[in-house]
């Protein structure tokens, strides 16, 4: 059961929560649509800064945890997870 949940979490974080630039998306709608104000007016972006920013410390810690957890699932280096974590 623990292995199954760990696998679900790795794939969820790696494939859904990490964006194309390698940063974590912090907030989502219930259907997993990211909450973003980046294409909004400057006023709206500033007002919603706490919902739409990069948290470098969380990104680094999450990358580290992904790289630590992936060998437990595949028994060796998971190249897809490592590539995304290093991004």
Image (spheres, rainbow, N blue to C red):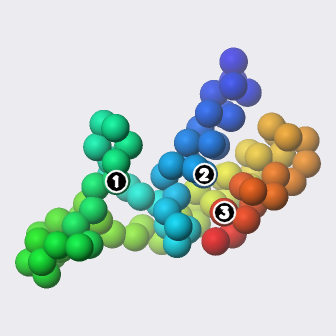
Which of pointers 3 and 2 lies earlier in the amino acid sequence? 2
Q: Residues within 10 Å of mark 3 (few under 14, many from 20)?
A: some
Can see residue 79? yes
| Alpha-carbon span between mark 1 and mark 2 | 15 Å
Q: Position of residue 68 (x, y in %)?
A: 75, 51
Q: Which mark is residue 34?
A: 1
In the depicted view, which residue is nearer to us: 36 or 86? Answer: 36
Residue at 62% in and 42% down: 11
The reply to whether the C-beta atoms of the residues labelled 3 and 2 are less than 8 Å apart is yes
The reply to whether the C-beta atoms of the residues labelled 1 and 2 are less than 8 Å apart is no
Among all residues in the image, which is located at the extreme top? 1
**Left or right of residue 76: residue 79:** left
In the depicted view, which residue is nearer to us: 27 or 41? Answer: 41
Q: Residues within 10 Å of mark 2 (few under 14, many from 20)?
A: many
Residue at 53% in and 67% down: 20
| Alpha-carbon span between mark 3 and mark 2 | 7 Å
Secondary structure of residue under mark 3: helix
The reply to whether the C-beta atoms of the residues labelled 1 and 3 are less than 8 Å apart is no
The quadrant in which the N terminus is found is top right
Q: Position of residue 5 (x, y in %)?
A: 63, 28
Which of pointers 1 and 2 lies earlier in the amino acid sequence? 2
Residue indicated by mark 2: 14
Residue indicated by mark 3: 84
Which of pointers 1 and 3 lies earlier in the amino acid sequence? 1
Image quadrant assignment for residue 51: bottom left
| Alpha-carbon span between mark 1 and mark 3 | 18 Å
Residue at 52% in and 72% down: 21
**Left or right of residue 52: residue 7:** right
Image quadrant assignment for residue 49: bottom left
Tell me if residue 30 comes above or below residue 23 in the rendering: above
Image quadrant assignment for residue 83: bottom right
Q: Position of residue 45 (x, y in %)?
A: 17, 74
């Amino acid at each position: 059961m623990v292995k199954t949940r760990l696998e679900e979490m790795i794939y969820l974080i790696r494939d859904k929560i990490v964006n194309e630039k390698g940063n974590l998306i912090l907030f989502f709608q219930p259907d997993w649509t990211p909450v973003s104000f980046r294409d909004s007016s400057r006023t709206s972006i500033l007002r919603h800064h706490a919902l739409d920013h990069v948290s470098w410390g969380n990104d680094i810690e999450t990358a580290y945890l992904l790289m630590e957890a992936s060998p437990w699932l595949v028994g060796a280096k998971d190249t897809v997870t490592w590539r995304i974590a290093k991004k």
